Amino acid sequence: MRRIMHHTTAATHESMNVSPTDLEEPTPFIRRRHVRLIIYAGLGLFVLLMVIWPLIAQFKDPDFQTHIAEHRVMVGMSKEQVLQAWGGPQTINTTFTKEGIRREEWIFEDWESASAVKHRYLYFEEGNLIGGWFQGSGERLPIQSPSNPHIPKPRS
């Protein structure tokens, strides 16, 4: 019996001599601390630029006079400033949210020829421009024609 216990204690001493690094797998690249810090710093810089860049443009032209002179609109403009820059829209659609916030969609028509028109859309919330898009920007194109148009048969 004594001999069996001797081997057991010897095996235990042997396993204690093995270092933890020999048993662990190497850390994956993405889990390394310096890699994560670089990724987080890059993401933080990206978010900071996305917030700061529009503010810098607004600090350079706080009342949007340069934008108005160049016939450009920018988020944050009032309806009066947009009217000065682009003139009046052809259509104004007004809605209200559940919270009672007034939203307006201004539609401008740009006639390229007698049969071709492109549209510009601006969206206002409580009198301030919050966004927009124009036909051709690739964001929200309306369906141009039905998938199976009806073609009339010629009369004989």
Image: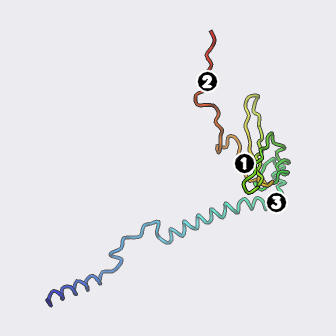
Instruction: Specify the label residue 110 is tagged with.
Output: none
Quadrant where the C terminus sits is top right
Residue 7 sits in which quadrant?
bottom left
User: Residue 88, percent across and down?
Assistant: 84, 43
Label 1 – label 3 distance at C-alpha: 20 Å
Badge 1, how many Cα within 10 Å: few under 14, some, many 20+?
Answer: some
Between residues 73 and 146, which one lies in front from this camera angle?
146
Type of the residue with mark 1: Gly
Label 2 – label 1 distance at C-alpha: 34 Å
Can you tell which of label 3 and label 2 is closer to the viewer?
Answer: 2
Badge 3, how many Cα within 10 Å: few under 14, some, many 20+?
Answer: few
Question: Mark 3 or mark 2, which has the lower sequence index?
Answer: 3
Residue position marked by numbered label 2 in the rendering? 150
Type of the residue with mark 3: Pro
User: Residue 79, percent across and down?
Assistant: 82, 51
Residue position marked by numbered label 1 in the rendering? 132
